[in-house]
Amino acid sequence: MPSTANMAIAMHRIASTSSLSGASPQQVIQNVHFRHLIMSVEDRLAKNPRDFAEQHLANLVWGAAKLKLLREPLFQLVEREVLSGHRRLSDFSPQQLAAIAWSYAMVNFDAPRLFEAVQEEATRVPQLAQVLEQAGLLRRSN
């Protein structure tokens, strides 16, 4: 079985380069090897979520969002791991949290707890607030 790093890198690279190869997101999503990768990622996330580093989690959902792939199990598992008691949002870089928030927004995945937690973290981390604002994801309280 590939390492979690290799799985995350594969998702990110496939999403980043698919348009260069002339493949549509739909063609990539329907590819049997890609489907196997997604199912392997979801299985590993369900069984051993701590095997995935913060960058891996960000790359996984970014790759899915870039391909416009709303895989509920993937997004639910990543959300659960990001908000789990053994991780702190401060373990994530501002870019990683922004990529995660952007990914959920791009596929319209309903994750209010995740968005609230990221928004709250942005009140403590100015760089995160800046990145979220640039992406149009920062809610300003009045």
Image: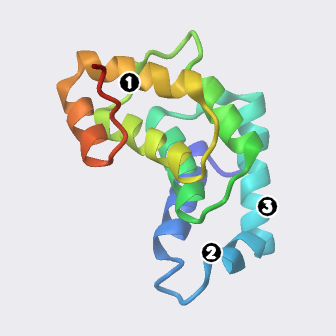
Element marked by disc 2? helix
Any part of residue 79 in sight: yes
- Residue 14 point in image, percent of width and height: 55, 69
Q: CA distance from mark 2 to mark 1?
A: 30 Å
**Circle 1 residue:** 119
Precedes in sequence: disc 2 or disc 1: 2
**Disc 1 residue type?**
Gln
**Circle 2 residue:** 25
* Contact (Cβ within 8 Å) of mark 1 with mark 3: no
Q: Looking at the picture, tell me which residue is in the foreground, 127 or 84.
A: 127
- Residue 37 point in image, percent of width and height: 72, 58
Hey, which quadrant is residue 94 in on the image? Answer: top left
**Disc 3 residue type?**
His
**In the shown orientation, is residue 41 left or right of residue 94?**
right
Q: Looking at the picture, tell me which residue is in the foreground, 76 or 133.
A: 133
- Residue 65 point in image, percent of width and height: 56, 56
**Circle 3 residue:** 36
Precedes in sequence: disc 1 or disc 3: 3
